Amino acid sequence: METIAIPAINFAPIMPEVILSIFGMALLLVNVFVPSEQKAYLGYLSLGGIIIAALTLLNGWGAPPQEGFSSSVQLDNFAIFFKGIFLLSATLTILISDHYMKREECNVGELYPLILFATTGMMLMASGTDLMTIFLGLEVLSVSLYVLAGFNRANVKSNEAGLKYFLLGAFSTGFLLYGMALTYGATGTTRIAKIAEFIAQNTSVAANPMFYIGMLLMATGFSFKIAAAPFHMWTPDVYEGAPTPITAYMSAGPKAAGFAAFLRVLIVAFPSLKADWTDLLWVLAVLTMTIGNIIALNQNNIKRMLAYSSIAHAGYALVGFTAGNAEGTAGILFYMLSYTFMNIGAFAIIILVGKKGEENNNVSDYAGFATKHPVLALAMSVFLFSLAGMPPTAGFIGKFYLFSSAIKAGYIWLAIIGVLNSAASVYYYLRVMVYMYMKDPVEEFDWMKASPAVMLCILVSVAGALIPGVLPSYLLELAQKAVLL
């Protein structure tokens, strides 16, 4: 009788994902039996899952890359660094969620499992060394985010945000999947490393129109995920309508996941076509940071302002991507981590200032805020200074590193355009501080009662926005060790 051999499966490369998935499913089950008034404890359980996943992840840092599932996933320093960003963004989001959900009278039962599932999808995208694995991670992330964006069912804008994100996200996914299909048709493989091998051995493939169209369609799909212009139109409406903690989460984690997958695909699969895709990225970077900053100048709603700001920040990261060198990749890693601290920290303050029904979200509503809450106003100023790239913040070091990489690669004009855009962004960030410090208070802000979890998030975010700006060497060294080049 013939025996069937079951191949050994190496779960080590995806162990953090397995842990988060188990906790997510367990939380869904526990949610059924926990009374509504006690569901805040689900947040603590989800944080426990994140801590266990993080401890598992740290064991792989500096070790030889581990592959699993027929080399379709890989745990290397690059994946570990990005997974750390995803776990950080999930942690900070969970810390600020309970305060908001209680104020909006939302049922939080499904919120935390969805955050864990979305984080699992992002981690698969960072580890994926096969186009199908990346697509699987993207779908797990996207489906979770569609629900999270429309989580506040009593709010019409939240419903609109969920529907818009679903329709446009599905449309962009079609571009990405069709691009992957064409690339497979041209090369005969979906394995990223083998695509590079095929191109090196068959130089004629570069003349195949189907191959170039596939690469462009994949770039289009990834550009949507990172909110790069001209594929950014969904961002302001979705960011404004989604629950504020989810807006904070979407602006940090999923954007970093898009860059992780985009970097791995282009750098590993298409290194021989670098001259072609760097020209494309040059245009994308200029369009993205310029459009984001120009439109942000006229925004009165602070969530929409930060939405267009996030578009501009994607443009800054694309500057490092265009450089195509080790410094540029390390700059993106450093910047994505720094951006997570300063952006989620800013949204934590927005949650405290806001009222039920997402009111009090205009810039003018911050008039006299420093008079009533000087410590929180100072924290908000730190986040805004870091977003603007002012020293001595992490945002300044991140932009300096990104623009320096472009100069080293010979893209002098791209670096100049980036600096000019960064200077222009100072206006709309300083505008918020002018209202906080130089305008007479209109509100008493007597409704503000910060929970310990929100204050912990703000404290951690302030440290993350300042310490890498003053002592950047350690974090930069970690980023350099995580580059793919």
Image (cartoon, rainbow, N blue to C red):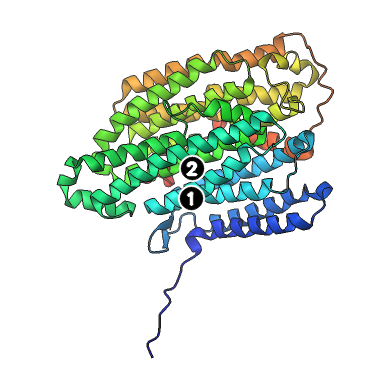
- Does the residue at mark 1 contact the one at mark 2 (Cβ under 8 Å)? yes
**Front tag of 1 and 2:** 1
Q: Which mark is residue 401?
A: none
Residue marked by disc 1: 137
Residue 151 at x, y = what percent? Answer: 66, 39
Which residue in the rendered view is the most extreme toward the bottom? 1
Q: Secondary structure at mark 1?
A: helix
At 38% from the left and 22% from the top, the residue drawn is 286
The amino acid at mark 1 is Gly
At 45% from the left and 18% from the top, the residue drawn is 421
| Image side of residue 48 versus residue 20, left or right | right
* 10 Å crowding of disc 1: few (<14), some (14-19), many (20+): many
| Image side of residue 210 versus residue 120, left or right | left
Residue 56 at x, y = what percent? Answer: 57, 58
The amino acid at mark 2 is Ala
Q: Quadrant of the N terminus?
A: bottom left
Residue 395 at x, y = what percent? Answer: 53, 28
Q: Residues under labels 1 and 2: Cα distance?
A: 10 Å
At 33% from the left and 36% from the top, the residue drawn is 324
Image height of 16 relative to 147, above or below: below
Image height of 418 relative to 25, above or below: above
Regarding residue 296, the answer to whether it shows in the image is yes
- Please name whichever residue, 135 or 199, is drawn nearer the observer in this view of the structure: 135
Q: Secondary structure at mark 2?
A: helix
Regarding residue 485, the answer to whether it shows in the image is no
| Image side of residue 414 versus residue 301, left or right | left
* Res. 171 image quadrant: top left
Residue marked by disc 2: 257
| Image side of residue 166 versus residue 153, left or right | left
Q: Quadrant of the C terminus?
A: top left
At 68% from the left and 52% from the top, the residue drawn is 46
Image height of 77 relative to 10, above or below: above
